[in-house]
Structures are given as structure tokens and as C-alpha cells.
Image (tube, rainbow, N blue to C red):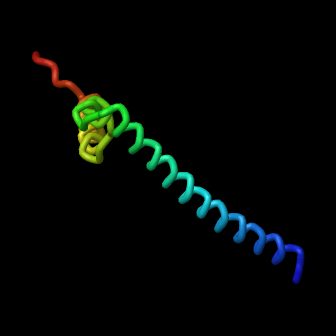
Amino acid sequence: MSRVAELQARIKADQDELLEAVKLERADALKRIKADIKLYDFKATDFKGLLESRVTQKKVDDFLASKAAKAKKATTPKKTAK
């Protein structure tokens, strides 16, 4: 096996190991968060402000549309009254 093929095989194995570790740690983090939510008796309304701060695709589309409208308005020459 060439050195390049050996390194590629090791990279692939490490990437697979990384994905597995991320899955396990994510599951553990979720378990801890759920336990804390139950322990401190959080409700969905306690997180309302956090959920509203998320950027949705609609917000992105609205922003881009308004930006395009402003750019178009800025490039349109103004007509002066005589």
C-alpha cells in the first residue's frame, strides 16, 4: 500500500470515528439538557425570546428583497421639476 493510500485510509477512519464521537456527545448533551429542564421546571414559554431570535428563511428573503429595492431606488435617477 502506498503512503498516500495509507494516509487516505487513516483519514477516512478518523472521520468515521469523529462522526461517531459527535453523535455520542450530542446525545449526552441532549440528555443533560433534558434533565436540567426537568430539574428546574422550565416551560416552553421560558424559551420564547430565544426562539424568536432565530433567523428564518423568510426573514432572509425579506431582508434581501428590501436590500434589492433600496439598491434599485438608489440607482434610479431622480427627475427634477422644471
Q: Quadrant of residue 42?
A: top left
Q: Quadrant of residue 1?
A: bottom right
Which residue is at 33% across, 38% downward? 54
> In this view of the protein, can residue 52 be seen by the observer?
no
Give the image location of residue 35, x and y in percent: 41, 42
Looking at the picture, tell me which residue is in the foreground, 74 or 66: 66
Looking at the picture, tell me which residue is in the foreground, 73 or 33: 33
Which residue is at 26% across, 40% downward? 59
Give the image location of residue 49, x and y in percent: 28, 29
Which residue is at 47% across, 44% downward? 32
Task: Report whether 73 appears left or right of 37.
Answer: left
Give the image location of residue 64, x and y in percent: 30, 40
Residue at the extreme top: 82
Looking at the rendered structure, the number of numbered marks drawn on it comes to: 0
Task: Report whether 3 appears left or right of 11.
Answer: right
Q: Where, quadrant-wise, is the C terminus in this rendering?
A: top left
Which residue is at 37% across, 35% downward? 39
62 up-or-down from 16: above or below? above
81 up-or-down from 3: above or below? above
Q: Quadrant of residue 74?
A: top left
> In this view of the protein, can residue 35 be seen by the observer?
yes
Give the image location of residue 21, x and y in percent: 61, 58
